[in-house]
Image (cartoon, rainbow, N blue to C red):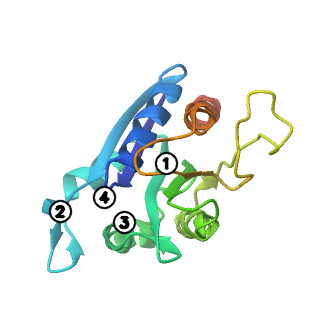
Amino acid sequence: MARLAIVYYSATGNTHRLAETIREGAGKHGEAELCRIVGADMDGGRFRNESLLQRLDAADGIVFGSPTFMGGPAAQFKAFADATSERWTTQLWADKVAAGFTTGSCLNGDQSATLSYFSILASQHGMIWCGLDIPSGYDPAGRNRLGTQLGLATETAGDAFVESDLVTAAHLGARVARLAARLSSG
C-alpha cells in the first residue's frame, strides 16, 4: 500500500479543499497525508519546517499544490521548493511518484505554468511525473474540464467548485496512489 504526501499552500481554503479531495481519492489505494504549508513555516521569507520535509522523505509519492498567483505558484510554495535543495543534491526523492494541482479565479489564469513549475521541480528531484489520463471533452463525467493533461487545474468563482473538478481531484489522487503502490511493490 502506497504512502502519499500532499504538500500544498492554500490562501483562501480552495487549494485545501482540493488537497482533501485528492486525499480521499488516494485513500482508496493507499494512505495519504496532508502537509499544509502555513505562515508559521516561514522565517525571514525562508521555509523552515524540517519535520514536514521528513514526512515527505518517508512518502512513496508527493503531490504538489498551490493556487496560481501571477502566473506561478504562491511565494510560500516557492519558499518550500527552495528549501528542498538539500534533498535535491542527494536525490533523496528520486523515483518517488509526483503530481500537481492548482486553482485560479479564471478559466485559464495561467494554471498550466504552475503545473509546469511542479513538474520541473519533480524532474530536478529525479521523481516520476504522473499527469491526468483523461482527455478533455471525451469523458462522460466531465472530468478534466479545463483540459490540462499535466495535472489538475481548476477555476473557482469565490469558493465554489464545479463538481466535475472535485471528481477530477479524487481521480488524480487515486491515480497517483495506484502508480505509487505499483512502483513501490516491485
Residue 139 x, y percent position in the rendering: 81, 33
Task: Name the residue located 64 percent from the left edge and 30 percent from the top edge.
Answer: 182
Of labels 2 and 1, the one closer to you = 2
Residue 121's tag is none
- Name which residue type carries label 1: Val
**Pointer 1 residue:** 63
Q: Label 1's element?
A: strand
**Pointer 4 residue:** 11
**Pointer 2 residue:** 39
Up the image or down, 8 lies above or below 180; here it is below
Q: Label 3's element?
A: helix
**Pointer 3 residue:** 77
Residue 46 x, y percent position in the rendering: 22, 76
Q: Nearer the viewer, residue 71 or 89?
A: 71
Up the image or down, 167 lies above or below 159; here it is above
Mark yes or no: residue 6 visible: yes
